[in-house]
Each structure stands twice: as C-alpha cells, then as structure tokens.
Amino acid sequence: MQPLCKDKESLFDVYSEKEELTKYKISNGRINYKYNDRVIIRELNPNTGNGYICGKFLEGDEYDTNKRGWINIKFFNKGEIKDLLEKAMISFLIYL
C-alpha cells in the first residue's frame, strides 16, 4: 500500500533531524532534500505524494530511472522508499 504524502515527508524528516538531509521548500509547496550539498530528493509534493530520488549513481537496473537519472517514488511503500534512499545516499558517498 502506498504511504500517505505526509508519511513520506515524515520519513525524510527523520533523516533531516539526524542532520543527514537538509530540507528546503521550492515552488508550489513542493520540497527538496539535499545530502552532502547535492539534491537527493526533489519535488516531493505534499498533496499527491509524487517525488523523485536520485538514482543516477546506483548500480544495476533494479529501479526505473528517467533520462536524467531520477526515480519516481509516487507508488513506493515506506520500506521501498527507505531502502532506495539509503542506497542513493551510499551511491553519493561513492561517486561524488
């Protein structure tokens, strides 16, 4: 089951509280999060739950990425989002 929009934001906010992610608002009430001064989560929409996690540095083809390397998380459950985010954070440490 897809988590509620606020559940996604709350999950990412846990990482913000640990000072691993930096949260900031962008246009139309959407939210971005940075990791090591790079955007890792973008355009999280608090109304629809749509958003993207950076997958351009992930190895393999476990996730569908768009042509810019972002993974749409609208239909991901909480466990899938957490797993993807942790993999993306590790990939940032390795490749950036």
Image (cartoon, rainbow, N blue to C red):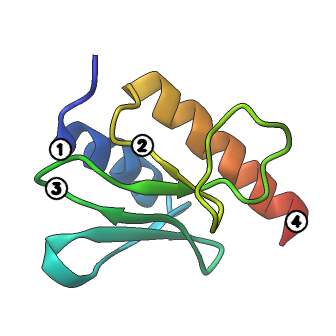
Q: Nearer the viewer, mark 3 or mark 2?
A: 2
Q: Secondary structure at mark 1?
A: helix
Of mark 1 and mark 4, the one earlier in the sequence is 1
Q: Residue 65 location, x and y as percent? A: 62, 50
Q: Which residue is mark 2?
A: 73
**54 is higher (above) or lower (below) than 35:** above
Q: Quadrant of residue 74?
A: top left
Of mark 4 and mark 2, the one earlier in the sequence is 2
Q: With 28 as the anchor, is 11 left or right in this view? A: right
Of mark 1 and mark 3, the one earlier in the sequence is 1
Kind of residue at disc 2: Ile
Q: Which residue is mark 3?
A: 46
Q: Secondary structure at mark 3?
A: loop
Counting other residues with Cα less than 10 Å from the Cα at mark 1, is it few (<14), some (14-19), or many (20 or more)? Answer: some
Q: Quadrant of the N terminus?
A: top left
Of mark 1 and mark 2, the one earlier in the sequence is 1
The extreme top residue here reads: 1
Q: Nearer the viewer, mark 1 or mark 2?
A: 2
Kind of residue at disc 1: Lys
Q: Residue 75 location, x and y as percent? A: 35, 32
Counting other residues with Cα less than 10 Å from the Cα at mark 4, is it few (<14), some (14-19), or many (20 or more)? Answer: few
- Mark 4 and mark 2: Cα distance apart in space: 22 Å
Do the numbered discs 4 and 3 sit on residues whose CB atoms are within 8 Å?
no
Do the numbered discs 1 and 3 sit on residues whose CB atoms are within 8 Å?
yes
| Residue visible at 41% across and 31% down in the picture | 76
Q: Which residue is mark 4?
A: 95
Q: Which residue is mark 1?
A: 6
| Residue visible at 34% across and 53% down in the picture | 13
Q: Residue 24 location, x and y as percent? A: 33, 77
The extreme left residue here reads: 47
Kind of residue at disc 4: Tyr
